[in-house]
Image (cartoon, helix red, strand yellow):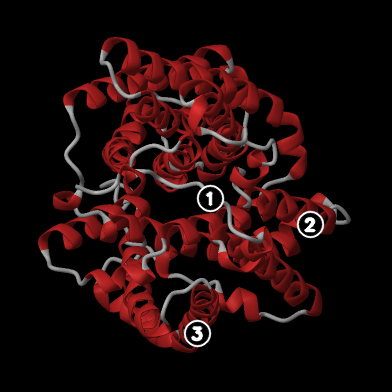
Amino acid sequence: MSNEKDDVVKSTPPKSRWTDLYLKEDWWAIWLGLFIVLAAYFSFASGSSFVKAIAINPGGLKWDNVGQIFAHLGANAPQYIMQYVFWLVFFTISTAIMGVKPSKFIPSFTLLYIFSIIIFAIGGWKYAQYFNLEPPLVALVLGLILANIFPIPRWLDEGFRVEYYIKTGIVLLGATFPIILIISAGPVAITQATIISVITCLTIFFVGTRYFKLDKRFASILGMGGAICGVSAAMAGASAVGAKKEHLYSTVTLVVIAALIMIIVLPFVSKALGLPAGVAGAWIGTSEFADAAGFAAAVSYGHMVGNETAALHAFTLMKVIGRDIWIGIWSFIFALIACLKWEKEECGVAPSPMEIWWRFPKFVIGFFVASIIMTIITSGYSAAEFSKYVKPNLIDPISSLRTWTFIFCFASIGLTTRFKELKSVGCAATAAFTIGVVVNVFLGWFMSTQVFYGFWSALK
């Protein structure tokens, strides 16, 4: 039998938090995202077309025969090679510093890049929208099929960096997200997210402990996973309260299954209800647990109704700005409760308020910085100049590179999800979590379509 201490998710802080600046994906997402933003600006300001050239993708071809795809790839081969080298160099160097062997990352990422081109090409089919073949969903579904039918070697997972890709994409999203919108919409998003986060988390916790007799630590990370940010919140919570590893693994399983279901269900239900893009994006932002899964659903619905911008803006306001900030807060609250109430005799020191900062998702900072930088840069242009020069030569290339990181992420989710490896979960935990999910989804729908409908539907 293993020692009980070995079964607990430890929360011992590293000797120096400065190492986070080059050892954590959050910070590398910031460095890479801001580098792309600044490189795009200097390229634009100097009249260079380099960044615009490497932002190419086959998603807008509207092809009706395969020969058109190969003709496009052949004619633009130098650009695709430059783009591949650009991504490969930055991702290889950064992941190597974080401890990933280049000998494993390079071949894995190469396959991911080729797979992503195929996904873009499918999305560029003339009839793709008619059949709802949205690139995020296609990337996810094809990835799931490959991962669960064919024996994909585990070492290939080194290149399928789900969190890294989505966090980089979120920083890039900031560059296309006006800071004025954040300032004006932030209070609404934070209010809605706070109400739903608190109610959902407490519902799962109290239902789990009082009616299903779950361990308090287990119920707390179930609540965080279902109310805030899925796997990331569950891991932060498990570390904060000293939960058993088996409880963390069970929570991750429930989060993954629910997130995958909602990636597919929420866009189609939103379409059936005829929701405006902004309203659906807000609902998805308050219902989906994980950033990556939520982005996939929001982008898919945006494509379905022809308004990706509004869906993404609403989702980002709700999820990234509204909900993700709760990771550090809930971690600190539950750590405090665990130390001062649940096992007071085992806790030598109460958690420091700085834990809120340590747990805070740092890539959100990059999102804000990118938004501020681009707002300052574009403020000197008239609306006509922005539409004629700035958008096609600066904003659009950044948006395209952002889309690449999203596709890398969605494909990686599918390619790393092996259903047979998901841990079996007890009925009590499943029931408590499911009740929380139902509450979360209903509250998200009510707040988005009833309470704040006028606000979200007006988003452009």
Which residue is tagged 1?
A: 12
Which residue is tagged 3?
A: 85
Q: Is residue 172 above or below residue 47?
A: above
Which residue is tagged 2?
A: 373
Q: Nearer the viewer, residue 38 or 68?
A: 38
The type of residue carrying mark 1 is Thr
Q: Earlier in the sequence, mark 1 or mark 2?
A: 1
Within 10 angstroms of label 1, few (less than 14), some, or many (20 or more) residues?
Answer: few
User: Which mark is on residue 78?
Assistant: none
Q: Earlier in the sequence, mark 3 or mark 1?
A: 1
Q: Is residue 203 above or below residue 114?
A: above
| Separation of marks 3 and 2 at Cα, in angstroms | 26 Å
x 47%, y 44%: residue: 291
Q: Nearer the viewer, residue 426 or 168?
A: 426
Q: Secondary structure at mark 2?
A: helix
> Extreme right residue here?
380
| Separation of marks 1 and 2 at Cα, in angstroms | 36 Å
